[in-house]
């Protein structure tokens, strides 16, 4: 039985295989409509989510399966003090696969230790978000056509941004990668991520507090929101929330083929005037999420079309 807790649980070859299946799903959706007819996905979301939860549910329904679960910790027995381990032990008897989001780092790993069915980490606190990274990789595959020799700018909340941490992990395995880390001092990339996945691998990188100064170098700009829910006090959040706003003026300084990604939701870090720019890929990115999650569910359930 396989789980997906961290993007590194998948080899580069397995990621390529998932992308190939996702491409086939996009091209031949009817072929996959009944591959999970007798399967049930449990979505255990102890933290709010729109895209990730609905993307998982849509993925399973499009494979012919069924979905059960909860979208808020307040509607689960965790409000009564039930542990993650006990919740998962019970749900394992109701479903065939679990997608779980939790505000505490490491909770999906605990879940996997007590589950008799595959567990997918759908985001754990400020830690990791591997299926968002698979979504990002499928988007890069479609928009850029390669994973090597890319300059990747990551902008905004690099400290708490689990999508950033997972993407750096994934891209650090490809050749010719250069990272441009753009954030205020208070939201810099954690030292453990920088050390393990950039410095120890001798990957070229630069840190900047200015998006305008570096946007012209980038092949990919990965924008993130400053996350109110990760801050201990409102004052710090309000001071930093508008640190970087991508608008038309900044886009004029970017390469003609640069792409803009964002895991969504956005607040105001990307001006709506950018939405019509062909380089703005974030809504296409959200749609790709369904197809790569379909491929992942099939892989972990060991079903084929």
Image: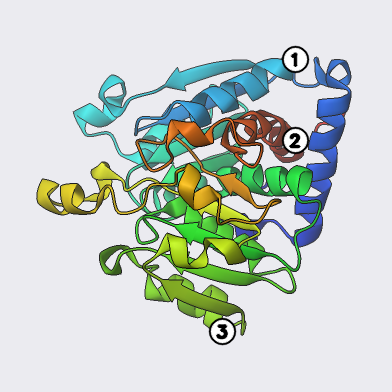
Where in the figure is residue 184, as x and y percent of width and height? 31, 64
> Which numbered disc flags the more N-terminal residue, 1 or 2?
1
Residue at 45% across, 25% down: 50
Where in the figure is residue 242, as x and y percent of width and height? 28, 48
**Mark 3 residue crowding within 10 angstroms, few (<14) / some (14–19) / many (20+):** few
Q: Would you say 242 lies left or right of 245 here?
A: left
> Which numbered disc flags the more N-terminal residue, 3 or 2?
3
> Which numbered disc flags the more N-terminal residue, 1 or 3?
1
Q: Nearer the viewer, mark 1 or mark 3?
A: 3
Nearest the camera: 166 or 36? Answer: 166
Q: Secondary structure at mark 3?
A: loop
Residue at 58% across, 46% down: 260
> Mark 3 = which residue?
200
Q: Would you say 219 lies left or right of 55 here?
A: right
Q: Secondary structure at mark 1?
A: loop
> Mark 2 = which residue?
295
> Mark 1 = which residue?
37
């Amino acid at each position: 039985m396989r789980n997906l807790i961290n993007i590194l649980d998948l080899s580069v070859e397995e990621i390529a295989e998932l992308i190939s299946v996702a491409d086939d799903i996009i091209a031949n959706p009817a072929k996959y409509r009944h591959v999970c007819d007798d399967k049930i996905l449990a979505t255990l979301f102890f933290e709010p989510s729109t895209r990730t939860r609905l993307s998982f549910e849509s993925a399973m329904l499009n494979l012919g399966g069924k979905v059960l679960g909860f979208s808020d910790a307040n509607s689960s027995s965790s409000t009564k003090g039930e542990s993650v381990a006990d919740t998962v032990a019970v749900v394992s008897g109701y479903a065939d696969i679990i997608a779980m989001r939790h505000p505490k780092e490491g909770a999906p790993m605990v879940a996997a230790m007590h589950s008799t069915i595959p567990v997918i980490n759908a985001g754990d606190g400020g830690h990791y978000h591997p299926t968002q990274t698979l979504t990002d990789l499928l988007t890069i595959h479609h928009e850029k056509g390669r994973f090597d020799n890319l300059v990747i700018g990551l902008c905004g909340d690099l400290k708490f941004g689990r999508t950033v941490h997972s993407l750096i992990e994934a891209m650090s395995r490809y050749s010719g990668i250069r990272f441009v880390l753009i954030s205020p001092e208070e939201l810099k990339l954690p030292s453990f991520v920088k050390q393990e996945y950039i410095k120890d691998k001798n990957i070229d990188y630069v840190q900047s507090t200015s998006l305008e100064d570096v946007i012209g170098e980038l092949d990919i700009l990965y924008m993130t929101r400053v996350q109110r829910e990760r801050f201990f006090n409102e004052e710090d959040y309000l001071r930093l929330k508008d640190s970087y706003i991508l608008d038309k003026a900044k886009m004029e300084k970017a390469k003609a083929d640069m792409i803009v990604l964002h895991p969504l939701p956005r607040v105001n870090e990307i001006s709506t005037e950018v939405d019509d720019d062909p380089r703005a890929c974030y809504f296409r990115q959200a749609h790709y999420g369904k197809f790569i999650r379909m491929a992942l569910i099939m892989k972990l359930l060991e079903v084929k079309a």
